[in-house]
Every structure is written in structure tokens, then in C-alpha cells.
Image (cartoon, rainbow, N blue to C red):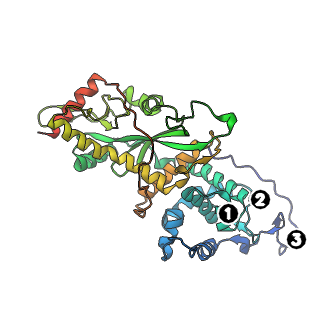
Amino acid sequence: MAPPKKSKKHKKEPRNLNKCKSVSGVPLGPKAVDSDWWDSFWQKNSTVSGSTVPSDDAEGFKYFFRVSKQTFEYICSLVREDLVSRPPSGLINIEGRLLSVEKQVAIALRRLASGESQVSVGAAFGVGQSTVSQVTWRFIEALEERARHHLKFPDSSRMEEIKSKLEASFGFPNCCGAIDATHIIMTLPTVQTSDDWCDPENNYSMLLQGVVDHEMRFLDIVTGWPGGMTVSRLLKCSGFFKLCDSGERLNGNIRTLSGGTRIREYIVGGVGYPLLSWLITPYESNGLSTSMSKFNAMHESARLLAVKAFSQLKGSWRILNKVMWRPDKRKLPSIILVCCLLHNIIIDTGDKLHPDVALSGHHDLGYREHCCKQVDHTGKTVRDDIAKALTT
């Protein structure tokens, strides 16, 4: 929730209206706000030795903040009220000017996009480490509250569009999306370490599960769970599973195929997930028929939507791809959620990322996918029906 606005008690002002008010000795006149932050930042950081910063101003902006200037202004509009409603005490740059909302958002985006230390980000903007920390967390709290409409499960009309696009691209009838999970790696203090947080690759990590549509937009996420869990266990602990299992989600129109076969709504997932009536996994690789092999190939193409979405997410917001240094495990889920919101905002606004932003390798490089042996009889029937439909 956004912090409640506090009522302000106004003191009686002196008659001399030309006298400037100040906070901690910083003048608050119209020129005291750091409004020319981009020109200063670009001049200071665009010619760093050995860097690959684009020479074009607009592309350079995207390079540093992952969004176009137009999308940046939209993000500022979402959080502006929250960022200006709190006392600005301490939020000043080295020249003694108050940080504008735009500069605060830029600092937060750069911290999330680069994953660089607060000291490095602060040096790039001419502010201290504590300012970067304070500004970034204020931004995260505000966007988490104000941008939730960018991450919600589709209504029936929107879902019909998603199903149509997925079938046109991958051939799967009545498919609603793809699911995958990734590890956010952490370094934890000794007092906080436990076997739960230690994952199969001996890293301390937090899991993030996401369901995506044909545009790699996140439709549902769950995070905050220890990396020591399997993805199948994570699924069953999620609200998404409970809604699907109770028939409250993926309960839209049933598709009747040409041969009379009826196919319900479902999503596709990898071998780490159980085969369910609404979650279709590939056939085991041994002794496959021609139709099974064709199904697996088409299934893999569709499933890769989720894999690519996580590669895009971690590549764009590199704070998630670097080892998080002693994060507050109560706050980390908010950081992860905000990165997912920013990922969706880029898609929703029609913004385009440079193709080199996405990770070149797998989003969970070094992790082995553990096979889940759970097979639901109804899910097996649905999978066979889909495979048959794809080969006729």
C-alpha cells in the first residue's frame, strides 16, 4: 500500500514574501529543483571509456533506463503523487538542489536496470549512496501500488485474443499461455541461512514463477518462496494453482475441434511441472511416435515464450540477474514484482528494447531441470487429444 498522506500544519509566514524558505539550509525557490538532470547525466556518462553507449540521445536514454523518454514520462506520472507527497529532506544532489521526480525515477530505474552498486549509481548521478537507497525504495513502493493494473489475469475477451494468437503461432488450440520459474540468487548473512533457501545448485535463492502470453507479458506471478523448493511444489503453493484447481481460472470457452474432440483451456509448461488437465507438459523422450515427437517440438516452441520472457526480464533489470547482496527477504518480493511490472509496461506502451538486452544464455544458467513424475489421468487425455489434433 502507498503510505498515508500526513496532514501538514502550516506556520504563519512572515510578511517578507521575497525571503526564501529552506530545508536543512537548501533553498526551495523555483530554480532549486534539479530539472536538467538528463543533460548533466548524459554529458557525464555518455563518453565513458570502453563503454558501448549509443551516440544517439534517444537510444542512449534507453540504454541507461531500458525505456523510451515517452514511457519514462508515463512511469513518472504513475508515481509522481507518491514521490512529492513525502518530505524531501535529504534528497539533494552534490550541488545542493532538490531532486526532481524525474531524477528520482531515473536513479531507481538505473539501479534496477544495471544492478550496479548504490555507490556506482550515486556517482553517476551526483548523489550519495543513502540517497540512492532511499529513492529506489520509495519508487518501488509507489510503483508496486500504482502500476498493478499492468499485471492482471485477462478477462474472457482478452483471453480469446491470446488463445487466437497462440494458436496462429504455435498450432495449439485453446492454449492460454506458458509457465516457467527462475531463481533470484542471494548472499545471506549467516544468521539467515537455512537449508530451505539453499537450492539444488548450492546457491541461496528466491523463486519467481510466471505465466506469460503470446507477447511474453506476465499474466500472473508468484514469488517470495525459498529456492530449495521444486517448481512443482512452488506451483502448488501458488494462488494460481488454487484458482485453476478449483475451476475459478482457465475455465473459459471449451474448444470443439473438427473431429468433435472438446479441449478445455490450459497452459503449457516444462518437464518440471506435473501433467494436469489445465497444465500440459511434453511426452517423455523415450519411444515416441511420430505424432508425439511433433507434439513435443510444437510444445517446446510455445513453452519457450516463458523462458524468453524470463531472459528478457533478467536481461533488462539486471538487479535480478546479479547476486543480491544480503537483501531483506521481506522486501525482495516487492523488488521482483516491480521489475515484472516494468517489463509489462514496456510491452503495454509499445516500447521496443534493443535485442541485445535479453540474456544470451538461459535465465537459470547452471540449473538442471528436475523432472516431475506426477501425471493426472485427465491431463494425459487432454494431451493425447491435442497431439492427435495437431497431426490430422
- Residue 230 seen from this side: yes
Farthest-out residue, top: 377
Q: In which quarter of the image is residue 353?
A: bottom left
Asked if marks 2 and 3 touch (Cβ < 8 Å), the reply is no
Q: Nearer the viewer, residue 282 or 166?
A: 282
Residue 304 image offset from top left, x and y in percent: 33, 47
Q: Which mark is residue 15?
A: 3
Residue 380 image offset from top left, x and y in percent: 25, 27
Between marks 3 and 1 in the image, the one whose residue lies nearer the viewer = 1
Asked if marks 1 and 2 touch (Cβ < 8 Å), the reply is no
Between marks 1 and 2 in the image, the one whose residue lies nearer the viewer = 1
Query: Tag 1: residue type?
Result: Gly
Q: In which quarter of the image is residue 152?
A: top left
Q: What element carries label 2?
A: loop
Q: Earlier in the sequence, mark 1 or mark 2?
A: 2
Q: Residue at x 82, y 71 (%)?
A: 20
Compared across the picture, whether 288 is left or right of 94 comes to left
* Real-space Cα separation, disc 1 to disc 2, in angstroms: 17 Å
User: Local crowd at mark 3 within 10 Å, few (<14), some, or many (≥20)?
Assistant: few
Up-down relation of residue 375 to residue 44 (above or below)? above
Query: Tag 2: residue type?
Result: Ser
Asked if marks 3 and 1 touch (Cβ < 8 Å), the reply is no
Q: Is mark 3 on a helix, strand or loop?
A: loop
> Residue tagged by mark 1?
122
Q: Earlier in the sequence, mark 3 or mark 1?
A: 3
Q: Is mark 1 on a helix, strand or loop?
A: helix
* Real-space Cα separation, disc 3 to disc 1, in angstroms: 40 Å
Compared across the picture, whether 136 is left or right of 179 comes to right
> Residue tagged by mark 2?
89
Query: Tag 3: residue type?
Result: Arg
Q: Which of marks 2 and 3 is nearer the N terminus?
A: 3
User: Local crowd at mark 2 within 10 Å, few (<14), some, or many (≥20)?
Assistant: few
